[in-house]
Image (cartoon, rainbow, N blue to C red):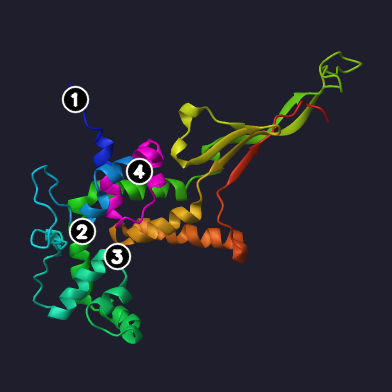
Amino acid sequence: MARARDPNRDNAFEMWKQTGGEIKLKEIADQLGVSEGTVRGWKAKDRWDERLNGTLQSTERNAPKNTERSKPKKTKVELPRHTEIENDQLTDKQRLFVMEYLRDFNATRAAMAVGYSKKTAYSIGWELLRKPEIQAEIKRQTEAMVDDLGMSVQRIIAEYMKIAFADISDVVDFGRKKVPLRDKKGNIVEDPHSGEPLTISMNYIDLKDSDHIDTSVISEIKEGKDGISVKLHDKMKALAALEKYLGYMTEEQRLRIEKLKLEIGKLQGSSAEDKGIVIQINYGDGQP
């Protein structure tokens, strides 16, 4: 009996396709809970690159040889139906600009794609985006995209949002607590008058139970001679990835992202490093 096809196999391709092939296979693997090698195998076996470019051809056993006459023609990539713009308020060039802009939400590239020079593309692109009729059309098309592709795109956004807004307190408990005072041999020290155990206040960091942690925000957990260290995924990388999906987000989501970027910028200043947050959990022995 043939083994059922893993549904994650199709989900992985959708995630890769929605980013234009720019998302890393490791990120897909992490989000789907599979190995990077598995995703790489799916990519090769299912010929993602050819499917993305619209050139996947039949590989039937009796297919004609790739002679000059029988060479398969490259199929032009068809835009989704929601990009068939019929807005009478727009000129032909403006319609093309909207279609190009919807590919990656890059106004400069879209302006160049419809014929404007590299020198003027930046300013003209932003001038076009300020026109109310173009803004309305982009909004209408973006809403249609979310309707057609929403589940896969919104899932990617949700995953990156979790990483970007992850907090240390989601992973560990920390504070101060009283622990018994011990001597160098590890024995509890007692009050010479009352006989009660003496205590001292100590800082503590405890890793939360795995059942209460969203492990998708964790990049690495390892145990060494100094205790356990937990590394969270890089917030700045998540924010950079989210930039590609701004056109699919709500206004509230965009504002949250901008606010977080400003907060991180203030904390890190100009010396921001491309590293995730690392939490070191050391287990002391209660000695002063």
Residues under numbered marks 4 and 3 in contact, where contact means CB atoms less than 8 Å apart: no
Residues under numbered marks 4 and 2 in contact, where contact means CB atoms less than 8 Å apart: no
Q: How many marks?
A: 4
Quadrant location, the C terminus: top right
**Callout 2 amino acid:** Glu
Q: Is residue 7 magenta?
A: no
Res. 104 mark = 3
**Which SS class for mark 3?**
helix
Which residue corresponds to the image point at 14% horizontal and 56% vertical from the top-left? Answer: 66
Marks 2 and 1, how far apart at CA: 40 Å
Disc on the earlier residue, 4 or 3: 4
Q: Which residue is mark 2?
A: 143
**Which SS class for mark 1?**
loop
Which residue corresponds to the image point at 19% horizontal and 25% vertical from the top-left? Answer: 2
Using residue 227 as the reference point, say whether residue 14 is left or right of it. Answer: left
Residue 254: name its quadrant.
bottom left
Marks 4 and 1, how far apart at CA: 22 Å
Res. 2 mark = 1
Residue 211 in sight in this render: yes
* Most common secondary structure along the magenta stretch: helix
Marks 3 and 2, how far apart at CA: 15 Å
Using residue 183 as the reference point, say whether residue 148 is left or right of it. Answer: left
Eye-nearest disc, 3 or 1? 1
Residue 12 in sight in this render: no
Q: Which residues are magenta?
A: 13-40
Res. 204 mark = none
Which residue corresponds to the image point at 17% horizontal and 74% vertical from the top-left? Answer: 96
Of residues 27 and 83, the one nearer the viewer is 27
